[in-house]
Image: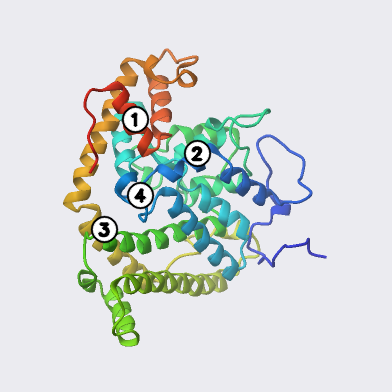
């Protein structure tokens, strides 16, 4: 008999009953699967709570209706579960991966990551995926017996490889890391527990990754329109969006702007999700995987957009890049945020005693390890806390408006 509450899983789904275990062995829970426990540990982590005050594009005080990292993460989780259920995957693992995918992000969105990467250039750089791994394996200090959250192999693997293999068949870094190499944090952990960096991640991790893209596109259209960075008519330059707008106008010719925006964003999500399910079904039928291992050893991503929808999604991203991410208003805030984080990094490197007590305990004596300590501290800050720390240490702090 199937355990109470457990849903059907396809043969190629990850089975929590056959999970590869945790770095530190633990007794099986009588009430939750291993993947459910991973999900719960992520939700109860300090890093997850901090997502509430980390922004995507706008800073925290721009308005209550714009997305934060937390609201984005919840939206990704919903889409990931929908994809997992439609494709016969383990919903709890897909959800755990969706909930953890942004844990390593800095304050001030991608600006913060770019800035911290520049500051850390001489010390191995900064990568938000590697930082997420550091958080769940080292920096979270909640449990009596170990640092980190002691997540299952499947969750850690998906966290690191959700965008594809990190190594090619010859053991060389793939395109993303070809120039600078794989981040040290990933290599160090991989030496403890082999995450099979040359293979694809599970179908659940792939579902969480594409759910991230879907959520990003939909809510950035929503936020950009509501912020006045572009108008509905501007969206017509994207054929995919123009088609959706025409559908809405034909069915609801007198719909007010707020409802038009919502009808558009919900259709964007629906079309993307339906396409991924259809393409996933097609690729799964062609691959005929008998196990999760067959997904990992495939020669291409299995859960993805069709070629036509991939181009449509890319056109949405090109529009948002030009009209939102590079909008003069956003760029000015990005410049100010860059100044804040550079000031903080320089100050803590020259005066590490300026950090809180828990961060200056047992300070490393060599510069690279000190820089990583400073980066860990800054990366964990919320937007609001970074501004407060800057005000504490400097006479003038930008308004970030």
Q: What is the crowding at mark 4: few (fewer than 14 residues within 10 Å), some, or many (at least 20)?
A: many
- The residue that label 1 is drawn on is 388
Q: How far apart are marks 3 and 2 (CA)?
A: 28 Å
Q: What element carries label 2?
A: helix
Tell me: residue 202, above or below residue 109.
below
- Which residue lies at the image location 24% right of the left edge and 42% below the top edge? 334
Q: Name the residue under label 3.
A: 227
Q: Where does the image place residue 92, in percent across and percent down from the top left? A: 62, 56
Query: Which of the labelled discs sits on residue 56, or is there none?
Result: 4
Q: Residue at left 60%, top 29%? A: 147
Q: Nearer the viewer, mark 3 or mark 2?
A: 3
| Distance between mark 2 and mark 4 Cα atoms | 16 Å
Real-space Cα separation, disc 2 to disc 1, in angstroms: 18 Å
Dot in front, 2 or 1: 1
Quarter of the image containing the C terminus? top left
Crowding near the residue tagged with mark 3, few <14, some 14–19, many ≥20 C-alpha atoms within 10 Å = some
* Residue 185 visible at all: yes
Q: Find disc 2 in the rendering and name its residue.
A: 47
């Amino acid at each position: 008999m199937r355990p109470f509450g457990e849903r059907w899983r396809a043969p190629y789904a990850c089975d929590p009953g056959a999970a590869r275990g945790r770095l530190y062995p633990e007794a099986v829970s009588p009430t939750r699967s291993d993947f459910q426990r991973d999900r719960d540990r992520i939700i109860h982590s300090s890093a997850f709570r901090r997502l509430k005050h980390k922004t995507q594009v706008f800073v925290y005080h721009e308005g209550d209706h714009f997305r934060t990292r937390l609201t984005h993460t919840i939206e990704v989780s919903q889409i990931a579960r929908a994809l997992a259920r439609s494709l016969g995957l383990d919903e709890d693992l897909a959800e755990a991966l969706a909930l953890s995918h942004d844990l390593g992000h800095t304050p001030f969105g991608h600006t913060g990551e770019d800035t911290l990467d520049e500051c850390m250039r001489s010390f191995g750089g900064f990568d938000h995926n590697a930082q997420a791994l550091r958080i769940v394996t080292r920096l979270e200090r909640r449990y009596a017996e170990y640092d980190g959250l002691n997540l299952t192999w499947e969750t850690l693997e998906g966290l690191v490889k959700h965008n594809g293999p990190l190594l090619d068949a010859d053991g060389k870094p793939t395109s993303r890391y070809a120039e600078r190499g794989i981040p040290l944090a990933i290599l160090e952990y991989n030496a403890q527990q082999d995450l099979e960096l040359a293979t694809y991640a599970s179908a659940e991790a792939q579902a969480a990754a594409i759910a991230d893209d879907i959520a990003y596109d939909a809510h950035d259209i929503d936020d950009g329109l509501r912020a006045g960075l572009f108008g509905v008519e501007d969206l017509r330059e994207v054929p995919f969006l123009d088609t959706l707008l025409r559908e809405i106008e034909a069915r609801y010719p007198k719909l007010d702007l707020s409802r038009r925006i919502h009808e558009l964003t919900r259709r964007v999500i629906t079309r993307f999700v339906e396409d991924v399910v259809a393409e996933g079904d097609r690729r799964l039928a062609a691959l005929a995987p008998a196990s999760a291992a067959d997904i990992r050893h495939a020669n291409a991503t299995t859960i993805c957009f069709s070629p036509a929808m991939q181009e449509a999604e890319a056109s949405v991203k090109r529009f948002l890049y030009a009209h939102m991410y590079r909008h003069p208003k956003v760029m000015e805030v990005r410049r100010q945020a860059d100044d804040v984080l550079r000031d903080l990094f320089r100050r803590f490197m020259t005066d590490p005693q300026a950090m809180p007590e828990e961060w200056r305990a047992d300070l490393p004596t060599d510069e690279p390890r000190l820089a990583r300590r400073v980066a860990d501290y800054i990366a964990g800050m919320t937007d609001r806390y970074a501004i407060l720390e800057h005000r504490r240490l400097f006479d003038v702090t930008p308004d970030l408006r």
